[in-house]
Amino acid sequence: MQNRAGIAATARARFDPTSVKSSSFYHLMTASVVPRPIAWVSSRSADGILNLAPYSFFTVASTRPPILQFTSMGHKDSWRNITETGEFVVNIGTETLIDEMNATSAAFESAVDEFDAVGLTPQDSMAVSVPGVAEAPIAFECVKHLILEVGNCSLILGRVVNATVREEVLADDGLPDFEKLGAPSRLGRTEWGLTPPTVLRERP
């Protein structure tokens, strides 16, 4: 086993963001910050056109109030729809939906309904006017809380006003079971992550 001194002496490749292409540094970050959960965001334009797109820069921003956040690189349809209507749904997909999730990442024209284009079923939400994905087992219904412009990206924060979870993915404690849910993740390049083994550790 190497000691700490030996580990510290191991050669490292340097990536200076000021001297490499921004696209190259983007790929370095997305291949390093892994696995990344995916917000499968459904929204509706002011003209009533449904939009659906996956975002892997996604996490929880606050628990009181409950706020989810995802990052859009540039001003895409999701950004425009949420800016204009103030509502969206964060759907949590499954491994069996990877092809559909990937397909909705295509640069469809704004007039295209991605639900229809990919063959997915809109499901009416309970607290917002935007539908969720019927095939996805979890849906967080959100209203716009804040949109921050950060560099070339927009950080979109939504306050969760309702959540629905299909009962078959719930564990005995009433929470989603990691293995039953089988939510995929994004890795680097064109790689997607599947449900990995888990270990248990009590917090100290």
Image (cartoon, rainbow, N blue to C red):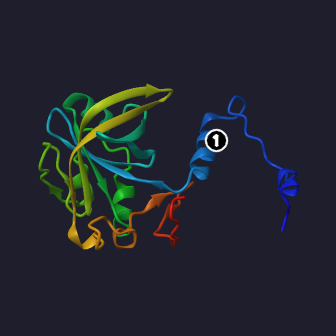
Q: Residue at x 12, y 52 (%)?
A: 124
Q: Residue at x 14, y 50 (%)?
A: 125
Q: Is residue 72 above or below residue 136?
A: above
Asked where in the image residue 143 lies, by quadrant, the reply is: top left
Position of the C terminus, as image quadrant, is: bottom right
Q: Is residue 150 above or below residue 130?
A: above
In the image: residue 64, left or right of residue 87 = right
Instruction: Say what amino acid the circle numbered 1 marks.
Output: Ser
Q: Residue at x 40, y 53 (%)?
A: 38
Q: Position of residue 120 (x, y in %)?
A: 22, 60
Q: Residue at x 56, y 48 (%)?
A: 30
In the image: residue 190, left or right of residue 147 = right
- The residue that mark 1 highlights is 24
Camera-nearest residue between 200 and 49? 200
Q: Position of residue 46 (x, y in %)?
A: 17, 32
| Residue 52 in view in this figure | yes
Q: Position of residue 67 (x, y in %)?
A: 32, 41
Camera-nearest residue between 24 and 110? 24
Q: Position of residue 194 (x, y in %)?
A: 47, 68
